[in-house]
Amino acid sequence: MLQIQTFDQRAGGNVYYKALSHPLVAEALGPMLARLRAGGFALYDPDGIADALFALYPDAPRPARLYVHDVLAVGQMRAGLAAAPLTELPRVTAGTVLIAAFDAGRIAARIGQLVPRGAEVLTLDAARLPERMLTNRARYLDRLNFATNFVFFRDADGLSTRLTTANYWAGYGAGEIRLWLRLFDAAGAPLATWEQPVPRGPGGIVIDSRRVRDRFGLPPFTGQLLIHAIGVAGHDVVKYALDTYASDNGASLSCTHDANAWPSDRYAGLPAPREDEQVVLWVQNSHAAPIPAGALALDRMGAERPVALDREIAPFATLALDVSSLLPDVRWPAQIELRAGRHLVRPRYEVTRGERTRIAHVNVERADLAPDPAIPGLPAQLGRGFLLPFPVLDRARFRTIVQPTPMAESQKTLPLRLDVFAESGEKVAERFLGCLRRDHALALDFDELAGAGQGHAELVYDFRAGGEADGWMHALVRFEDRHTGHAAETSFGAHIFNTAMTYKDEPQSYSGPPPGLTTRLFLKLGDARRRSFAVLIYPASAAWHPTSRTSLLLHDAAGEVIAEQPVAIACSGSATVWPDAVFGQAMLERAGEGGYVLIRDPSCRLFGYHGLMDDAGGFSLDHMFGF
């Protein structure tokens, strides 16, 4: 496992990780590392990043000695060396002292009298991003300087990808924003690097792989796109929806949420294939260092018998890994766990069945959670507590299948119940699923539930048979067209919804402290072949407003609101929204390709799923993102 700290629940992302892992920083470090190889050097590690530095750059030369100024850190092992007190630096015989820090001018001045006579002082400032790529030039390690994310990006074999999002940073006071983009091919080599302006207001953003390929005259490719947003405010996360569509008029169609910007040790929510399916995990190296052979592994969830991938993966490279090549006997409804060793940002997987493919994402499996003994006895003011809402589509056309997924390394049991609601908010069915074990193989088909029609369902904790809970309840939900065989799947986690009382950080808020009791969701528009739609759910852990006060705001490509329509959704109910039916095709054409619908509600927190649907039986569905 890479010795890197990628995320801190208290402080958010580790800025040093992003500063060290950026591909331009990796390129700039090359000359410095070459100089260090020419002779011995000592390392001063003021911020405790030595492990991350040498984990991300394993071919870098190692220092003769490592120094710290914190007396409590003296003797600690960092980068394979026992940390020595900084006061011993004058006695080192190395010809170079490397200060492992950015914005290191003051640090260098402070220790100047300790540097051996004649020794050269180097700092990581030699590998800074160019000034024009910084949002805050006064403070290099400002998190807003590293608003980056990866995108699975493909234009090959009749399949193309399209990213859609909006300039949500404008709502936080951002001015001019640019996107710096670099496309890597399957081998990890850069195919193209360019910049794209963003509408100054809350306009739409579209990046289509077919246009990128045409613009740069590229061959077919499957790889990853790095996005670096410059000039942002409020959010340092690049959020987006990604559609994979058949550019040759084939049958495939799917969509996924944005990648999580932080590599994790493990990922879960990867389904095993059925007998008539192939499941490919798209392994995409997120760093400038190769992934060593044996560093990645797959395991049947709960088996604790991981099977390692015995091959190296080059920096920023993409590998299509057929999960059956490592786990040939594991079949649906079993689940697969990915041991990723912090080498990957949240990967995608692709399921091929006949002439159709679908793409979805796995989720971060938390290593920092333990069962919370307070959850079984949450006070009555929090009602049913943690809920995981998801759609139940039109039963005449679609099958809906739900599979609870362990999403923390400590989870041994999942004590769950399923509550099913009509669109009107009436509870129409209930099923106790039991106290499931980590290695369970339950996949509940809603055809087994009498009275469950179109609407939505919610997984909730139910401790009648014992078990533990940590609040990180997840599930994979699969939707299958009974007539065409096309399928879509999505996965997400539970929250406490729409209560005035709070528990720890729930109900979550997009900005500010809990409770989060408002909605701001992004819904992309369709195209000439495909209609856009969303299923909006009004989940309530306890009684809240009888109906929502939801507004659908149609924005054009420049971010101007050109139409608005109110929607009232019953508490514990749901509604399916079709923008072309709500606003009419003429208004959608006026909105243009970059247009979108913003779903706002000042009275309650809605949860939503969005997708596309065509006349040939293709459809996509994944959870929406908000800001």
Image: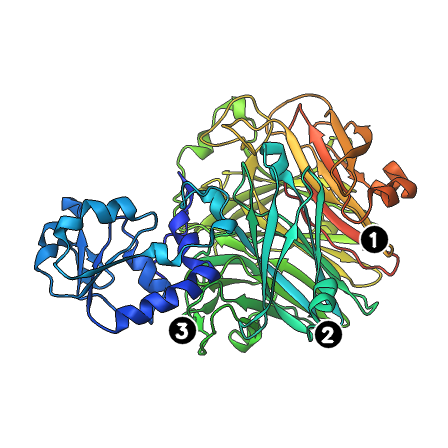
Judging by the rendered image, the residue that carries numbered circle 3 is 292
Instruction: Identify which residue, 337 or 3, lies in the foreground.
Output: 3
Three-letter code for the amino acid on which mark 2 is drawn: Asp
Residue 475 screen position, x and y as percent: 59, 50
Residue type at the position of mark 1: Asp
Q: Earlier in the sequence, mark 1 or mark 3?
A: 3
As measured in the structure, the alpha-carbon distance from the residue carrying label 1 to the one carrying label 3 is 42 Å
Question: Which residue is denoted by mark 1 in the rendering?
Answer: 527
Quadrant hosting residue 282? bottom right
How many residues crowd around disc 2 within 10 Å: few (fewer than 14), some, or many (20 or more)?
few
Taking the image as shown, residue 508 lies to the left or right of residue 368, namely right
Q: How far apart are labels 2 and 1 at the CA level? A: 21 Å
Q: Which residue is mark 2?
A: 157
| Quadrant housing the C terminus | top right
Q: Position of residue 589 (x, y in %)?
A: 87, 45
The image shows residue 291 at horizontal and vertical percentages of 43, 70
Distance (Cα) linking label 3 and label 2: 29 Å
